[in-house]
Image (cartoon, rainbow, N blue to C red):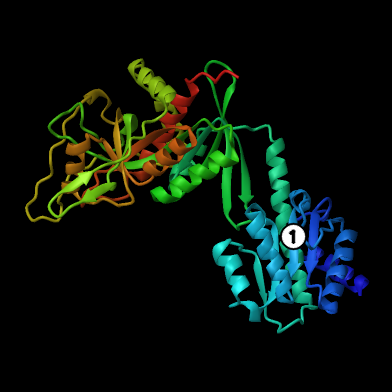
Amino acid sequence: MVAVSLIRAKKFLKTVSTSPNINKDFFNGLNIWISASSRKKEIIDLAQRYQIVFQKLGANIIQIDKNLGNDTKDHIDKLDLIIMFAATPGISARALEICNKWPEYKYKMYIYMPKEYEEGFIRRRLAEFHGVKRIRHLEEKSFCLRTPRLFEKCLYDILQENQVKRMRAMLAKSEHKPNIGIITALPHELNAVLETMYDIRLETYRTPDEIYQEYRLGTIRCDFGGKHNIVVARAGKGNNKAAVLATNLINKYPTIKEIFMVGVAAGVPNVKNAKEHVRLGDIVISDEHGVIQYDFIKQNTNLTHYDPPARPPSHAWLTHATNHLALMKKTPRYWSYLDKILANLDVIRPKTGPLRDCPWASGRKAIKQPTYDRAHRKRPRILAGPIASSNTVLKSARVRDKIRDVFKVKAIEMEASGIAEATWQAGKGYLVVRGICDFANDDKNKKWQPYAAAAAAAFTRDLIETMPLMQE
């Protein structure tokens, strides 16, 4: 029977080994505890057979006292995964006991039980209270677990677990220890940022909770010698996704000191003040007021009270950005970076259109925009100011202007408050760099997004290059 199972295992491994993530020696060094219901002889035989097969494939089988004594925690610490065949309620109860005593080990547990246990108390307690996600329900009734399907499920679970283990080990040995994280929301924002980096390589990461994420690791040179190590990831739209990704980045790469949010945003025009007016294609960076979460409000019957939490950006990077802007030459270096990004991505700067806050209104004329610098009207102008953020796609000139009047913001977007909150909670810094692609009005469209994303990425590279490396 063991020989048959071993042949079946090798056949299965040969089938899945065509995947680049699966190696033939994936079982080598894996520490496994296989536990089974002690009152069912067929289940005990099944567990013993699996133990022998997995040992022959290179795994280390660890025996743990079923009574879960005081020294059990030390043994479980050394395990990579726990396999439990819950053919009777007893083994399920042991799984529950482990979760009650040591909830941190729930991520190592794989529990196989008949489908008839699906609505049972222990199963619901494990899943709903403790959050155990690796409960495999089998279609077979009662204790008929001796099936090829079960064996393959078990094998695949082990392969996935060892993949995570090896990825963690590889990351621990990696020489790339990023000091800066860059988060984008849209694909063309990610593409623009990657055009500014060197030595780019992709790292994929999949957690035991089935969370999958891609990270691009690369470098940006430093004008003072050396290079900044960068990790780039795309969150998708919205503050919630951005906050989760920022937290994951910080947890995964503890060497990160600051996170940049780089991409596009809506500009907040000010036609009565040329110096404060924001145009399409301009760049806005967060100033000392940081990000304003404008949907953080208290709503009374006749009054809306705004109460956004104060989350200022990184002092070091804000100081550097302020000085960098003050000393910037008439022909800034980031212009050449922008031209290169546009050429590589085959992006053309759109023609500047009129400001039409209500294009649908009959007879509504376009609003004349002030010109601040006629000599460089086709180049981005960089402004610093508060940036408004919420989970709202804003297409209302009236609301936009109200937010401007209350908070003096220069841009409105949907990710930065999540970044600000996540970095503040983790004791890290942040900076927001946004290229302006629309005016948050009824005329909102995506025509300027590729250019605005390229402008933000080009200035970000220039800013990072001119920042000295942190002293060790």
Residue 430 visible in the shown view:
yes
Q: Quadrant of residue 219?
A: top right
Front in this rendered view, residue 346 or 279: 279
Front in this rendered view, residue 320 or 80: 80
Front in this rendered view, residue 151 or 130: 130
Residue sitting at x 84%, y 58%: 63
467 on left or right of 199: left
Q: Which residue is mark 1?
A: 82
Number of disc labels? 1
Q: Position of residue 199 (x, y in %)?
A: 61, 33
Q: Quadrant of residue 252?
A: top right
Residue 19 visible in the shown view:
no
Q: Residues within 10 Å of mark 1 (few under 14, many from 20)?
A: many
Residue sitting at x 72%, y 42%: 169
Indicate whether 21 appears above or below 117. Answer: above
Check disc 1 and give the amino acid type. Answer: Ile
Q: Position of residue 83 (x, y in %)?
A: 75, 64
Indicate whether 63 appears above or below 12. Answer: above
User: Which quadrant of the rendered structure holds the N terminus?
Assistant: bottom right
Q: Quadrant of residue 64?
A: bottom right
Q: Position of residue 230 (x, y in %)?
A: 55, 33
137 on left or right of 303: right
Indicate whether 348 appears above or below 34. Answer: above
Residue sitting at x 54%, y 45%: 248
290 on left or right of 353: right
User: Which quadrant of the rendered structure holds the C terminus?
Assistant: top right
Query: SS at mark 1?
Result: strand
Residue most extreme to the left: 363
Q: Position of residue 350 (x, y in %)?
A: 31, 41
